[in-house]
Amino acid sequence: MGWSQLFIASRTPGAPPPPLPVRVLNCLLVWLALSLVFFFAFHQLAYQWHWQAVGANWELFVNGWLCTIEISAAALVLSTVLGLLLALARRSRVLTLNYFGRVYVEIVRGTPLLVQIMILFYVVAPALRVPDRYRVAEGVVILSCFSGAYIAEIIRAGIESVGRSQLESAQAIGLTRPQIYRYVIFPQALRQTLPPLAGQFASLIKDSSLLYIISIPEFTANANAVNATTFSPFECYIPLAVGYLILTLPISLWTRRLERRHKFET
Amino acid sequence: MKLKLEQIAKSYAGHRALDGVDLTLADVRSLVLIGPSGGGKSTLLRVIAGLEYPDAGSVEINGERVVYEEAALLRHRRTIGTVFQAFNLFPHLTALENITLPLEKVHGHGPAAAAEIARQLLARFRLEGHAARRPAELSGGQRQRVAIARAVSIKPRLLLFDEPTSALDPEMTAEVLDMIKELREEGRDFILVTHEMGFARQVADQAALLAGGRIVESGPAQQIFDHPATPQAAEFLAKVLKY
């Protein structure tokens, strides 16, 4: 066995994966390289670590993390509903709806979330006389409006991936238009859309961090608050990164599994 | 079945796919549409199926005129079993579910009754072992047979086959044609578009040759195949029966 086999996977398609020790070795190398870079960087900084000050505020971190989960979960449901409606609007023959869907998607996807939060929270919400106690709910709505535009495009692509012949068969057996969507298009589109949808949900979780600018007590806002009193940015932001990773990593792995399964099915 | 087609015309983007099709058959069990590719066979079948709106003309089945409006067409399609060249089945449903879907959602059968009808049909066509399989797990021939079983399951007044075997290899073609023949012997009315001339001659009692969007010749199948009256039909048949 040559040295190269320790580091390079086989070129043959369908070859078995490299043996476990080889994989472990390469993982370790990646880990070592990353550690070295960060160790060196932080060493240069000669940073004084104050974990105790931050540790004393652990409750704020936990509460913020839970708040982020709540907001993300609620926004996930709402943005899916919104995305579905927008996708249908974009396919609608009613031109007003169709154009609205288009304009909405382009504007929301083309502008920064930060600006959208500002305008919706400081301009639109007060105009609608939304009481301040609904701040978290407003955050959920704003995030859903943003994410809904992306989900609309994902769902639209999924619907369009269902072939014309399928629609024709569905028509030929006498299904009505809503039935065609319900029994033929959606079940097939769902499979197409699940992987990108899961990816969008991971983004949604991270995007929820921008809600700190309207003082919703989510994860990032609370980490900021702790930093403001303890002046220990890294001790605040490193747990923040880890906290988000705990939420997004499983989704990312799940996405990959969905993609694999989808490949086998078609 | 009584079939009356009058002056049917249909154009796509300037191309006249059907250019005034006239055909009156007082009593036909099985009609086969033959002719060169692009001659309008499939378009005509789709107009009869209620999947395409003709630009002009009328279709009458058993004295009943087909109304080309969405609500009426929906009712019309529900009395007709259509089988296309390929991709008839829904890939996310099993063979059994493909058959029960229209029975339950369109024809109002309960789930148990629908499953029973589907099971009986699958058994009759020796497909019972495939009931739980998805289309991707079936051969092309099995897929077409399940599609035909689905078309038959609703007890249609008319079956339409649009080149049901052109995407299949010869062995699978035979199993599908056997099934169509069986339906013919059972006395089902159908219209078949096909390039399988030998089979067309066997099962059809009437034949019509379409070319350039018009019916060039029509009449009893034996007569058309053995003694075509028009030079165009003679030429077409000589070409396709050469090998």
Image: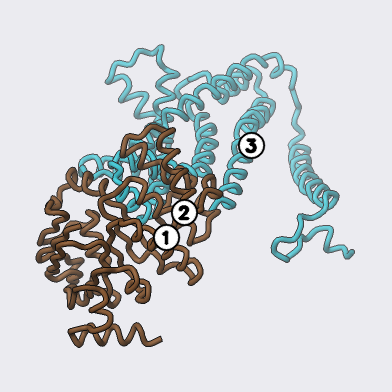
Chain colours: A cyan, B brown
Q: Contact, CB < 8 Å: mark 1 with mark 2?
A: yes
Label 2 or label 3, whichever lies nearer to me, is 2
Q: Position of residue B232 (x, y in %)?
A: 21, 85
Q: Please tell me in which quadrant of the rendered image residue A15 appears.
A: bottom right
Which residue matches tag 1? Answer: B179
- Give the class, few, some or many, for how many residues have Cα within 10 Å of label 1's Cα (few <14, many ≥20): some
Q: Chain of mark 3?
A: A
Q: Residue at x 41, y 41 (%)?
A: B117
Q: Position of residue A6 (x, y in %)?
A: 84, 58
* Element under disc 2: loop
Q: Chain of mark 2?
A: B
In the image, what residue type sits under mark 2? Phe
Q: Please tell me in which quadrant of the rendered image residue B51 appears.
A: bottom left
Disc number for residue A249: 3
Can marks 2 and 3 be said to lie on one chain?
no
Q: Is residue B57 visible?
A: yes
In the image, what residue type sits under mark 3? Leu
* Element under disc 3: helix
Q: Residue at x 43, y 43 (%)?
A: B118
Q: Contact, CB < 8 Å: mark 2 with mark 3?
A: no
Q: Earlier in the sequence, mark 1 or mark 2?
A: 2
Q: Please tell me in which quadrant of the rendered image residue B185 appears.
A: bottom left
| In the displayed structure image, the side of residue A202 where residue B160 appears, left or right | left
Q: Position of residue A40 (x, y in %)?
A: 78, 42
Which residue matches tag 2? Answer: B125
Q: Residue at x 19, y 71 (%)?
A: B15
Residue B1, placed above or below residue B17? above
Q: Position of residue B127 (x, y in %)?
A: 51, 52
